[in-house]
Amino acid sequence: MNFAVFIISSRLFLISAAVLLFFVYFRIKLFNLKIDFSSRKDENRSVFKLLDLNGIIHFHTIYSDGSGRIEDIIKTAKKLNADFIVSSDHNTLKPKFDGLEGYYDGLLYFAGEEINTEFGHLLALGIKSEIKRGKYKEALSNIKRQNGAAVICHPHNWWTPWKNFKVKGYDGIEIINLDSQWRGMNPLYMLAVICTYKINPFYALHFLSHKPVKTIKFWDSVQKHKSLKTGIAAADAHSNVKVTRKRRIKFPKYSELFSVARTHILLEDKLSGNIEEDKTKITGALKKGRCYFSFDLFGIPKGFYYGVSMGGRHYFSGDSIDVSDSVSSNMDNKDKNAIIYAGININQEKNQFIINLFRNGKKIFSSNNRGLVYEIAGENATGLSGSSFYRVEIDVYFGRKKITYLYSNNIEIYT
């Protein structure tokens, strides 16, 4: 009798387990999170509207330790509606010398370089001649001579971290680096990625969208007067994982990783179509901080703007605003105030969102489901230090799940 009960209980357990696994499988298989963007008009955006170009920065090809040919990667990026892409093979600029830079049916490709230094890896963008691995100061000096942009790569990657956080002279930091996002994951999430990748790559890759708190704290800490450090998102794609001594697999695919996070360049006018001119424009915007970055896996942002109005003038990310220069004594008191604006065309009926304003790394104001407007008296805009740095982050909700979806660069207000 007891044996019969055991058999029945075992069968019920197996049936229940099978039903549960079936349910979990299809939940993962059908999992998809997309932001619903509206086309509503925002009068504030018309003031701060700039041309938005989305770019894929930092990926590796067969010229170093990647698995993809540049020609094939360009085709992939075109299908994903990227406006420009920048490769960064290790210690080589050979793709440029092989004549691969240029426009491909509207998509601009140019080569950068990831340089090995004694402190870690340094990304060089917009350079014309190759820079060999070597000392940080030498590499930085070479980048500056070429009017390029120097960006610290994956500062908190456990495998190849940045080793000297007191260095000076660089232009930016990879805040989002997808290789670091992967390596910095909770082991349970990492297991979830491995187990679910074949079922639904979107489900697996959405775990990469966690907020890199440690890197953001570093970023906030190094903002200096008239020396703002630009934050960017980097794919750091290789599509080339070593499984055994002789076997490698193309994981994750370029197409999948390119979809997760991108850097958006903000320009006042369109690209000219001249390769060298446009490389200079994009590099200049990156150095200036005229850009933002976002997890485009959930949708390419529409209608995002961020800026400050003060004394009848308008300023954008990357700008340093001198209060005494922006206002005059004969102005009304109201005109002397700084008004910070930010917004995005998210359909709040489908996706709840919050725009958070940060000053010197601390959240000071939030706007729920609508554009942010924050007014401060001119003399208070700089805080106690005489100089303050303002940026915004946008959190988007999918039910109870929150994703910090978008990060702006800083605007400085000083006296």
Image (cartoon, grey):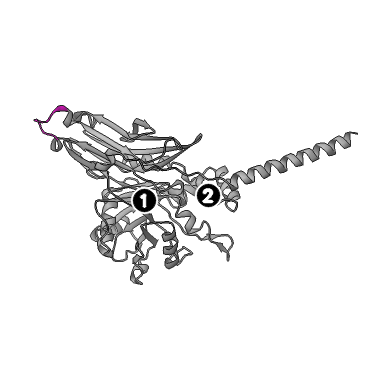
Q: Which residue is mark 1?
A: 263
Q: CA distance from mark 2 to mark 1?
A: 20 Å
- Of the image marks 2 and 1, the number of the one nearer the N terminus: 2
- Say above or below: 161 vs 139: above
Residue 27 visible, this orientation = yes
In screen coordinates, is 196 left or right of 109?
A: right
Number of disc labels = 2
- Image x and y of residue 383, in percent: 24, 30
Please name which of the two marks, 2 or 1, marks the residue nearer to the observer: 2
Q: Residues within 10 Å of mark 1 (few under 14, many from 20)?
A: many
Name the residue at 31% across, 42% down. 305
233 is within the stretch colored magenta: no
- Image x and y of residue 203, in percent: 54, 47
Q: Amino acid at mark 1?
A: Thr
Secondary structure mostly seen in the magenta stretch: loop
In screen coordinates, is 294 left or right of 184?
A: left
Q: Which residue is mark 2?
A: 202
Residue 108 visible, this orientation = no
Badge 2 vs badge 1, beta-carbon distance below 8 Å: no
Q: Secondary structure at mark 2?
A: helix
Q: Which corner quadrant holds the N terminus?
A: top right
Q: Amino acid at mark 2?
A: Phe
Q: Which residues are magenta?
A: 327-333
- Say above or below: 28 vs 386: below
